[in-house]
Image (cartoon, helix red, strand yellow):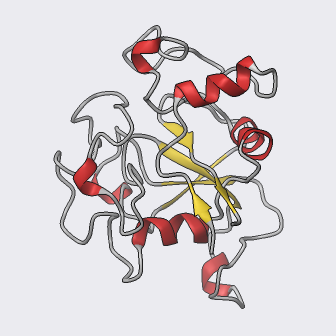
């Protein structure tokens, strides 16, 4: 019932919005090991990092005509129709499925693990970079929510949610059900995003 980006938003995609004057630069143009990352053609197809929730949300709204996915949308895209533990299935994570546990030591090109796509054909929903989603963080929201059908998250809160784990995350943090809370102003070398929209 919705569209979601097949990959995390790349440096090249985000730069097009910045160059058009509609988005703000990331807070750093480096990555963990690459001093020249954003704006360097060598890394055009790598996920943009150092983008806080507000910048990510603006990109989705003004550049794609959509929004950051809700937690429910993100998890549906990651887990498929049978609630897979990981996007590729229930087999434990390993270096053939995802970029995590410092097995590469930085981000990698999107779609770098073509055999680990989710049921819906989305890539890198585990590892590479954490992904901002639209929701406010509510620790017990899903236990107490009156709706199990596409819940939209709390109406307010202190933190925003990120999903999926990053290139530095251990096995327990790349399960599709894991949630992370961050201040909306947080940026870093391990967090990016993808967008969603209604059809």
* Above/below status of 195 relative to 129: below
Residue visible at 49% across and 45% down in the picture = 130
The quadrant of the rendering that contains the N terminus is bottom right
The quadrant of the rendering that contains the C terminus is bottom right
The image quarter in which residue 198 lies: bottom right
Residue visible at 70% across and 61% down in the picture = 135
The image quarter in which residue 129 lies: top left
Give how far across and how far down residue 15 sits, in percent: 63, 22
Q: How many numbered circles does the render carry?
A: 0
Pick the front one: 96 or 155: 96
* Above/below status of 13 relative to 66: above
Give how far across and how far down residue 78 sits, in percent: 43, 65
Residue visible at 65% across and 80% down in the picture = 150
Left or right: residue 141 versus residue 32 is right
Pick the front one: 41 or 161: 41
* Above/below status of 38 relative to 98: above
Left or right: residue 195 versus residue 46 is right
The image quarter in which residue 176 lies: bottom left
* Above/below status of 140 relative to 36: below
Give how far across and how far down residue 97 sits, in percent: 22, 51
Pick the front one: 92 or 78: 78
Pick the front one: 128 or 2: 2
Left or right: residue 189 versus residue 138 is left
Left or right: residue 34 versus residue 161 is left
Give how far across and how far down residue 46 sits, in percent: 43, 29
Q: Furthest-front residue in view?
A: 199
């Amino acid at each position: 019932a919705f569209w979601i980006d097949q990959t995390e938003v790349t440096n090249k995609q985000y730069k097009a919005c910045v160059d058009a004057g509609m988005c703000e630069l990331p807070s750093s143009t480096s990555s963990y090991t690459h001093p020249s990352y954003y704006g360097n053609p060598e890394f055009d197809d790598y996920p943009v990092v150092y983008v806080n929730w507000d910048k990510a949300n603006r990109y989705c709204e003004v550049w794609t005509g959509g929004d950051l996915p809700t937690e429910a949308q993100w998890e549906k895209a990651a887990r498929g129709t049978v609630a897979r533990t990981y996007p590729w299935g229930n087999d434990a994570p390993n270096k053939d499925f995802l970029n995590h546990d410092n097995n590469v030591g930085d981000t990698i090109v999107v779609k770098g693990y073509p055999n680990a796509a989710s049921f819906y054909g989305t890539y890198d929903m585990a590892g590479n970079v954490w992904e901002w989603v639209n929701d406010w963080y509510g620790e017990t929201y899903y236990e107490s929510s009156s709706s199990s059908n596409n819940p939209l998250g709390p109406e307010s809160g202190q933190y925003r949610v990120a999903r999926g784990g990053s290139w530095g995350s251990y096995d327990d943090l790349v399960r599709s059900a894991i949630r992370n809370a961050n201040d909306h102003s947080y940026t870093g070398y391990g967090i990016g995003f993808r967008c969603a929209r209604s059809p």
